[in-house]
Image (tube, helix red, strand yellow):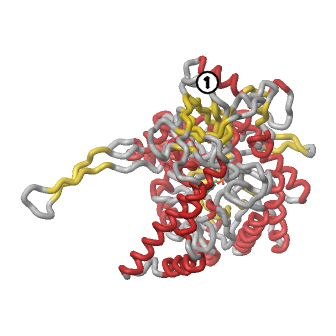
Amino acid sequence: GYLYNIEGWGDPYFAVNSSGNISVKTNGVETTSEQEIDLLAAVKAATAKNLQFPLILRFPDVLKHRLDSLYTAFINAIQYTGYNSHYQGVFPVKVNQNKDVVDNLVNFGKGHVVKFGEDHYYNFGLEAGSKPELLLAMHSLINGSPEAYLVCNGYKDMDYISLALVARTIKLNTIIVLELEDEVDTVVAASKKLNIRPVLGIRARLLTTNPGHFGSTSGKHGKFGLLEAQIYAVAKKLEQLGMLDCLKLLHFHIGSQIPTTSILSSAVREASGYYCNLVKMGAPMGTLDIGGGLGIDYDGTRSGSSDMSVAYGFEEYASAVVQAAKLVCNQNGVQHPVLCSESGRALASHHSILIYDALSVVEDPSDSVSSDELISRLDELVGNPTKLHANLKSAVRSRDSNNNTSRAHADQLKKHGVEIFKLSRRLAKQLEAAGETTYSYHANLSVFSLTPDFWGIKQLFPILPIHRLNEQPTQKGTLIDLTCDSDGKIDQFIGEALTLPLHALEQSGGGYYIGTFLAGAYQEPLGCKHNLFGGPTLVRVDSTAGSSGGFTVELLATGPSAADQLKAMHHDPDEIMNDIAKQGAEADDWTENIVKKVLGDMPYLFGAA
Ligand code: PLP
């Protein structure tokens, strides 16, 4: 266990049991043996049912424990800080749109805990970022807590907004978050047309930035949200339209994996300042939605020094948020808002594990070039470091120029850089192997579709065998998938390692099981259809014989409809439509008609022409 730092990233859910297998403690800290599941036994039970690898094993109990822990952290922080409101979160469904996951969370979200002599109801809700997501969220929340928020983010057209308004008529606590100034006009138009008053939020674009990989959407030049002056302009506009009373929430999202609580505090302080000003302008407000960003310590170091690690847990996160909000509201004499977060990664990561089977292993051919030779080639390429540096600088400067000579120069340098990178990597591999042979383990998985973040952005996950952990691994290996694609390879592991300690196979043809852990957030939806936005439409362009410049276009295949995408995540589009319509019918004639009309106006969502 120590070898893979399970204690670091896995606590309190994963440990090694006396048989040397991973055990999953589904209720976290309360470790009575009944609540420990032997992962190998679970895998064998699945294969006994003839289920095929790769497997994704979901542990809903772990999901529940994550939710309970998040709420407990906020309830404690609120009590100890003397904060005069409560926490009420939402799950951003983009993080894992699987029906099972979403329904579990909505169901757990109806729960409560007794703390400090009081009942604390969760009223946990959902966040949607596209029309299909909104549909599945509406459907799931029909059976959720009536108080739960349904936060509508993302780019919104007339149909999206109409759907969100319809959600209000079927008694879902829906909030439309304005991300662009123009969205106000669309909301006003839709609201007038349907005669439904919205509840609105505004997404702030903060100056506080999240420095990590996931923070590229934050800061003054971020893609989403309104800068301070625009926020007040929107509020003014709402006031002129007689709709300022609809404005009830301020939201921000500075990106996933916020590395430290000091960045978090500064974001919450900044947003709280805008929140207070909106209250002073006369908006009713009531909720501060701090978005996602609650991170996961993938490498178990708690260093907060890279995208792999955050330097805090739920307690520190909650406490930083509560204190920052309290401070700014007190300074402004403003009532403390309900605190909402859109924590996705932190809730969903631990609860599912990707398991694959190593079928065979081959010795990697030894490098034909010696380390000494590699070093001298590197020396040659790097040459004089000062000169290389100067060259790079001038290449950066001429990057955007149209001058062919400087472009060619930049291209040359790029090739040069790539060459240096490749050589360094080869050398690092040799050093890491330290004269030992390395091995390629062939496993039945597809890196591209199962851990797309590894494939796309080199996000690393804890990877290790799920059994034989009381046996010293004797080989250094990399993992190769069966897609026969050079990208289908895992050759980078936590701790900047290029190989993973693995055991010799006892037999070929399977039976050595390896798991990718903390993979319950983003991987499945990315591997399928991110945000359920849909795929491309395939069109063929033929030139017309005998006419230069003439051509015909022909549809080859339409992209997947919203219905197709919902099905991919195991939702039943017909059931969604019927159940939403039924909710309308159960209300009154007016609602029944509105719901029917709005849904009926969007046949394209369901693949009809
Ligand atoms: N909210 C919004 C608006 C997002 O874009 C995201 C994802 O990046 C999240 C919430 C979830 O973030 P996290 O997984 O870091 O909690």
Of residues 490 and 555, which is closer to you in this image? 490
The answer as to whether callout 1 falls within 8 Å of ligand 1 is no
Residue at image coords 56%, 70%: 382
Give residue 545's quadrant in the image: bottom left
Residue drawn at x 61%, y 33% is: 355
Circle 1 sits in a helix, a strand or a loop, which is it? loop
Does any portion of residue 408 appear in the rendered image?
yes
Instruction: Measuring from the top left, give residue 45's x and y in whole percent.
Output: 65, 20
- Looking at the rendering, the quadrant in which ligand 1 lies is bottom right
Q: Residue at x 56, y 59 (%)?
A: 374
- Give the answer, above or below, for where 287 lies relative to 299: below
Which residue lies under the disc numbered 1? 511
| Residue 317 lies in quadrant | bottom right
- Report the quarter where the C terminus lies: top left
- In the rendered view, tell whether residue 102 sits above or below residue 152: above
**Would you place residue 322 above or below residue 414 in this image?**
above
Which residue occupies the foreground of this view, 366 or 555?
366
Q: In the image, is 537 to the left or to the right of 352?
A: left
Task: Tell me residue 449's x, y (percent).
Answer: 51, 42
**486 relative to 217 in the view: left or right:** left
Query: Residue at point 73% right, 45% down?
Result: 123
Total label count?
1
Q: Amino acid at mark 1?
A: Gly
In the picture, the quarter occupied by the N terminus is top right
Residue reaching furthest to the left: 546
| Residue 252 visible from this viewpoint | no
Mark 1 neighbour density, 10 Å: few (under 14) some (14–19) many (20 or more): some
* Closer to the camera in the image, 96 or 154: 96
List x then y, in percent, for residue 553.
21, 53
Frontmost residue, 425 versus 6: 425
The image shows residue 251 at horizontal and vertical percentages of 66, 62
